[in-house]
Image (cartoon, rainbow, N blue to C red):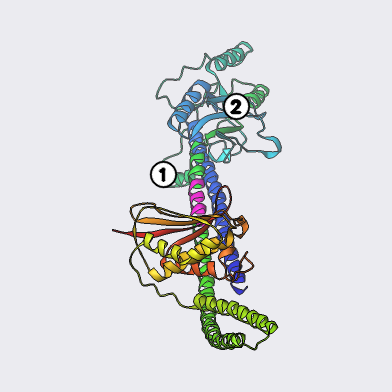
């Protein structure tokens, strides 16, 4: 009971350790997923910084950005970051797209209830991963945002302003490669010269104190400018990042965590099996110790019982002898003679049982020698010839001559008990067959069969137990002695059915000699 409680405690501890390991791996996997997502968002922030630089480099004509040049630059940016960046979109104040590059841009669901991230199986869409104002340089006072116009739209608006009486200017010059951004404004006003390049101004520039001013173009009315800002002004932008690298990181980490959990499970199962084997070994050792003690006690009891049986047999012989003397006296009445014969018969029965018990309790010392098996069988048949003739039994022996290794006296006793058991089982004119047979080049078997009532299947194992018998006149030790002799030789005995009726006792694994 103590061992069972200890085993249950060990199994519980092992299971708890495995649960802790699995929980630890799950927590670590969740942490890795969070860190990988945060790393992807940080990468999007880095790209947004690059996007701000692109917007600054494309500004022309009072904060107006050429859509064609901007989208070409954005396309080049997507191409350079193609492993992670799928697409970029610039939005106005109404969350309408004014410029884009790349693929996979889906604005549905963004901006609702402050939603700035939308994750799906293949991509993640991020709206303004950083403050747009930190990436662009504007008027220090202001709220001015870059305005994105296509070249044709810009030309049309400029021409319309001239027709309405605006300042007489021709269309803005076509941008050429290598042009510097120009603050295009009507009138003779020239753009302010840049501040002198000195330490103070450089410091002001680094600290953000100096920013060039980009206001409304003078060829555009205030109302038109405000309307254009609402429709074409850059208010926010959206970055579409690929999650392929993220998913590969997830899968790799999940496989690693799964392998760790599997190894932990194997370790726990192995430890449990090892603990179970140790427990079984401990239980087996305890049983062996108890069995050894019990065996020693039984051996002592066996010796005491054998000594008692031996000492009891001597008085019985005296009683039998005295009863025979009384029956031989001439003046003994016939009634006394009958009672004396009953005493002699009962004494013989008790003496036979004592002899069987002493024979069963005697230690079996095997003296192996070469002997002819058919010779031993013939001697047993001759010894029981009177009983065979008395019941008119037909006994048949079959088999080729062979030499085996066995103790001759013990083998003769075992065959004698088997044949005697068969004689007692059959009726008059019964049949008994003794068959010796080679099974292989090194083994042989002996079969003693009869056509008696046979042995039921459920009793074929119990029939070899001491004092178990189906014969009213039997002692129940004959077959137990046979099994004892067979096991001492290392053989095997079985009780089988004999078709169509009867029983067969087969001794197998007899060792053949050349």
Are the two marked residues, 2 and 1, in contact with CB atoms closer than 8 angstroms?
no
Q: Residue at x 47, y 23 (%)?
A: 72
Task: Give the camera-side residue of 139 and 6.
Answer: 6
Q: Is residue 324 magenta?
A: no
Q: Which residue is mark 2?
A: 216
Query: Foreground: 107 or 182?
Result: 107
Crowd rating for badge 2 (residues with CA inside 10 Å; few <14, some 14–19, many 20+)? many
Q: Nearer the viewer, residue 256 or 220?
A: 256
User: Residue 488, image x and y in percent?
Assistant: 43, 69
Q: How many C-alpha atoms fall within 10 Å of the one at disc 1: few (<14), some, or many (≥20)?
A: few
The total of numbered circles placed on residues is 2
Q: On the rendered structure, is 511 left or right of 274?
A: left
Given the current orientation, which residue lies at the most extreme front position?
Answer: 330
Residue tagged 1: 198
Please tell me whether residue 210 is drawn above or below residue 397 in the rendered image: above
- Residue 192 visible to the viewer: no
> Which image quarter holds the C terminus?
bottom left
Nearest the eye: 6 or 508: 508
> Which secondary structure lies at badge 1?
loop
**Kind of element beneath mark 2:** loop
Image x and y of residue 119, in percent: 60, 37
Q: Position of residue 377 (x, y in %)?
A: 42, 61
Q: Position of residue 121 (x, y in %)?
A: 57, 34
Q: Nearer the viewer, mark 2 or mark 1?
A: 2
The mark found on residue 322 in the picture is: none
* Cα distance in 3D space between marks 2 and 1: 30 Å
The residue sitting at 43% across, 62% down in the picture is 491
Q: Which residues are magenta?
A: 254-264
């Amino acid at each position: 009971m103590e061992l069972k409680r200890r085993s249950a405690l060990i199994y519980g501890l092992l299971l708890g350790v495995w649960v802790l390991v699995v929980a630890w791996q799950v927590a670590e996997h969740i942490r890795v997923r969070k860190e990988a997502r945060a790393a992807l968002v940080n990468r999007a922030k880095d790209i947004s910084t690059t996007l701000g630089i692109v917007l600054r480099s494309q500004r022309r004509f009072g904060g107006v950005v050429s859509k064609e040049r901007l989208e070409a630059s954005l396309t080049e940016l997507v191409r350079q970051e193609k492993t992670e960046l799928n697409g970029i979109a610039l939005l106005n104040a109404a969350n309408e797209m004014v410029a884009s590059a790349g693929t996979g841009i889906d604005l549905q669901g963004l901006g609702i209830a402050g939603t700035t991230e939308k994750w799906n199986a293949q991509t993640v869409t991020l709206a303004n991963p950083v403050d747009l104002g930190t990436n662009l340089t504007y008027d220090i006072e202001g709220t001015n945002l870059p305005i994105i116009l296509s070249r044709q739209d810009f030309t049309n608006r400029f021409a319309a302003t001239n027709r309405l009486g605006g300042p007489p200017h021709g269309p803005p010059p076509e941008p050429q490669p290598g042009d510097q951004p120009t603050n295009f404004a009507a009138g003779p006003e020239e753009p302010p010269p840049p501040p002198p390049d000195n330490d103070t101004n450089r410091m002001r520039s680094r600290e953000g104190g100096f920013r060039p001013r980009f206001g409304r173009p003078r060829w555009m009315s205030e109302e038109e400018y405000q309307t254009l800002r609402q429709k074409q002004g850059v208010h926010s932008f959206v970055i579409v990042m690929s999650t392929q690298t993220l998913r590969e990181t997830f899968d790799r980490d999940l496989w690693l965590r799964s392998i760790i959990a599997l190894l932990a499970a194997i370790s726990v199962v192995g430890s449990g099996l090892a603990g179970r084997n140790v427990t079984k070994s401990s239980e087996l050792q305890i049983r062996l110790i108890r069995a050894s003690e019990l065996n020693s006690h039984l051996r002592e009891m066996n010796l005491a019982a054998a000594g008692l049986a031996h000492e009891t047999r001597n008085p019985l012989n005296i009683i039998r002898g005295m009863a025979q003397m009384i029956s031989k006296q001439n003046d003994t009445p016939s009634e006394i003679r009958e009672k004396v014969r009953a005493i002699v018969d009962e004494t013989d029965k008790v003496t036979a049982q004592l002899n069987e018990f002493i024979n069963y309790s005697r230690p079996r010392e095997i003296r192996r020698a070469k002997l002819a098996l058919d010779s031993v069988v013939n001697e047993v048949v001759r010894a029981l010839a009177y009983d065979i003739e008395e019941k008119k039994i037909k006994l048949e022996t079959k088999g080729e001559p062979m030499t085996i290794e066995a103790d001759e006296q013990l083998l003769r006793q075992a065959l004698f008990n088997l044949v005697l058991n068969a004689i007692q089982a059959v009726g008059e004119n019964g049949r008994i067959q003794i068959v010796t047979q080679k099974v292989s080049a090194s083994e042989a078997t002996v079969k003693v069969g009869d056509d008696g009532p046979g042995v039921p299947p459920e009793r074929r194992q119990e029939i070899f137990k001491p004092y178990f018998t189906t014969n009213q006149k039997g002692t129940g030790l004959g077959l137990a002695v046979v099994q004892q002799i067979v096991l001492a030789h290392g053989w095997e005995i079985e009780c089988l059915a004999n078709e169509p009726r009867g029983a067969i006792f087969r001794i197998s694994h007899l060792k053949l000699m050349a």
